[in-house]
Amino acid sequence: MRRIRDSLVVLLMIFGAVHGQSGDAGHHARQALNCAECHTCKVPTYEVPCLKILPGFTRQRGITVHHTAEDAPQIIKIDVLSQIYEPSIFTHKLHAEMAGMAGGCVSCHHFNPPGRIAACRECHDATETGTNLDKPGLKGAYHRQCLNCHRQWSHRNECAVCHVEKGAPETQEEIAEKAVKDVKHPVISVPDKLVYQTDDDEAPIVTFYHDAHANDYGYQCVDCHQNESCSRCHDTMKQTASGEREPHDNCINCHAYEIDEDCRKCHGVEEKARFRHAQTGFELGRYHAALKCRSCHQQGQPAARLNKDCNSCHQDWNRKTFNHQITGLMLDENHLDNDCIDCHINRDFSVAPRCDDCHDELSYPESLPGKVVR
């Protein structure tokens, strides 16, 4: 009983530390806590937290399983309880095809070590009786992964859904036949654009460019579709598919200001045009236009504003690190050893280079410091 109580205390402490603190002043490390309750080392760090609850977890190596459904095996035969039941046939590829809405591979293969996919029993002890709340035993781990979705989907959770008792009418041949069936989930069509009719009287139309968020901004399905899983479409107790969460929940992480202060950013009386980068006051040239948003907007959300000064991104450019030929101009031998600032005043690459610092009689582009190669 004491162990259960202590484990609950540890879980509540961690939950509070993660969800209930804001800023360094409230960080749990500054509170009068006994570090040994959660950490095995004397000085836990961000990189090596040495947690008791998840002893193999590090932020750099914690989750390394990222495969497509095509990489997945067709079926997995689970026979841990073969003395009681016939083997359970898990249609792994079918579940992998549906996993995009529920977190991908990591929804099951959480805290997987690098290099390979670990079997559940490598971390979850098959002999665990359920008294250790730090980590469920193998039976608990299997059931927790399966029951949540199946209970929402079919509202059935009796053992016979997955387990066939020894000697039951279903024979080994029938089990084997079920195992080799190539069951595929229909491809989920991904919309380019969604237009919502809201209950806003003055500006009811919201236009959402789904393809831009997925392809350009780098979001995964699970970033927005976090709690939907199979039951969104397959809940057998409902006549229609379940609706989405509160409309602003998926948007508030990036658009908190607009939601609170500028509704017309999204709402209007007609469909809104696609976002164009020129709206920010920084029109993309041919080189920047070919980049993904994440190439420049690496910190925080893609919409975060950046310093438009060229050196904020290109401070490391010099004659040794930058191949000038990619601009379409190969420098001649007289200019090859020049520093960028000799032609690009103040290292401002957004304006045309100048020659007059060295050549009173020459100007760009009438006179070129090399040969056009494009």
Image: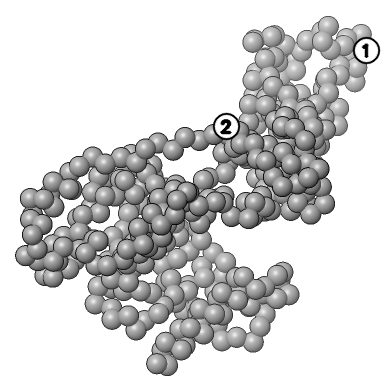
**Quadrant housing residue 318:** top right
Amino acid on which the number 1 mark rests in the picture: Asp
- The mark found on residue 360 in the picture is 1
- The mark found on residue 222 in the picture is none
Expressed as whole percent of the image width and height from the top left, the position of residue 132 reads 36, 81
Is residue 59 shown left or right of residue 18? left
**Quadrant housing residue 140:** bottom left
Q: Is residue 123 visible?
A: no
**Quadrant housing residue 63:** bottom left
Residue under the point 24% across and 67% down: 159
> N-terminal of the two: label 1 or label 2?
2
- The mark found on residue 192 in the picture is 2
Pick the residue in front: 59 or 240. 240
Residue under the point 56% across and 39% down: 214
Q: Quadrant of the C terminus?
A: top right
* Image position of 213 with respect to 278: above or below: below
- The number of callouts visible is 2
Expressed as whole percent of the image width and height from the top left, the position of residue 250 reads 62, 51
Residue under the point 51% across and 67% down: 48
